[in-house]
Amino acid sequence: MNKIEQERHVLVIYPHPDDEALGVSGTLAIYAKNNVPITYACLTLGEMGRNLGNPPFATRETLPKVRKKELEKAAEVIGIQDLRMMGLRDKTVEFEDDEKMVKLVTDLIEELNPSLIITFYPGYSVHPDHEATGRAVVRAVRRIPVEKRPKLYCTAFSKDCERNLGEPDIVNDIREVQDIKIAALKAHISQTAWMLKGLEESIAQNNPISERLTTERLWSYQWDRDEVD
């Protein structure tokens, strides 16, 4: 397990509401408890999310407003001080102009001067929006002189990620903030109801809690090996 280091500013860039809750809400909650400034740039409102609640409580037309409120609640629960909704459209991030995407990321970096950026690992994050987001972040950071680059930590979950990337570089023990991670997942209830039902049943039966709720895994981007065109 890694000791979570103090950071000057953490910038999180993901495309969808709930990406942060699923991937790094525990890690972010610990940063927040340590008074580290956190900015979350969420590129879309996840308006094309496949779930409308279980049982359904949203429609395709109302889902963007629902997910916006869910995102705001999750950010509040986690302790994210600066939530930014960047206004791109769900499931179209991959079609955005490359330079537009790089500029979006570069502008955030220049404004915030983060010591750490968290995003998806290009090539190992499955969803086209995840991949496009990770690529834009890598391209933007690559343009910064090596000695001035912030650290870049990435979430990855494709089936071949450990085979190709090796074991994760960062494994954070989040048991102290497990209740916050669960609350963040609950905040995104339109998308996570199916997951939380099984979780609550396990807790009620005193079954072992999933490792996903006790640790969070991240990879340092490998500049000397990986190349994003």
Image (cartoon, grey):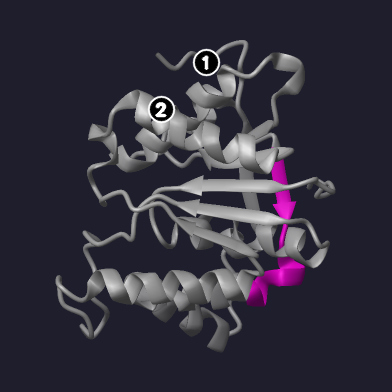
Quarter of the rendering containing residue 173: bottom right
Q: Would you place residue 34 above or below residue 184 in this image?
A: above
Identity of the residue drawn at 64% across and 74% down: 180
Which residue type does callout 2 highlight? Gly
Identity of the residue drawn at 67% across and 71% down: 178
* Residue position for label 2: 123
Q: Would you place residue 69 above or below residue 131 in this image?
A: below
Identity of the residue drawn at 71% across and 62% down: 174
Quarter of the rendering containing residue 112: top right
How many numbered badges does the structure rendering display?
A: 2
Q: Secondary structure at mark 2?
A: loop
Residue 153: horizontal and vertical position, in percent? 63, 37
Q: Residue furthest left?
A: 60
Please tell me how crowded label 2 is: few (under 14), some (14-19), or many (20+) other residues with Cα within 10 Å: many
Q: Would you place residue 209 above or below residue 107 in this image?
A: below
**Residue extent of the magenta highlight:** 170-180
Residue 64: horizontal and vertical position, in percent? 27, 68
Numbered label attached to residue 226: 1
Please tell me which residue lies in front, 215 or 42: 42
**Do callouts 2 and 1 mark residues in contact (Cβ within 8 Å)?**
yes
For the residues labelled 2 and 1, the Cα–Cα distance comes to: 10 Å
Identity of the residue drawn at 63% across and 64% down: 80
Which residue type does callout 1 highlight? Asp
Q: Would you place residue 177 above or below residue 217 in this image?
A: below
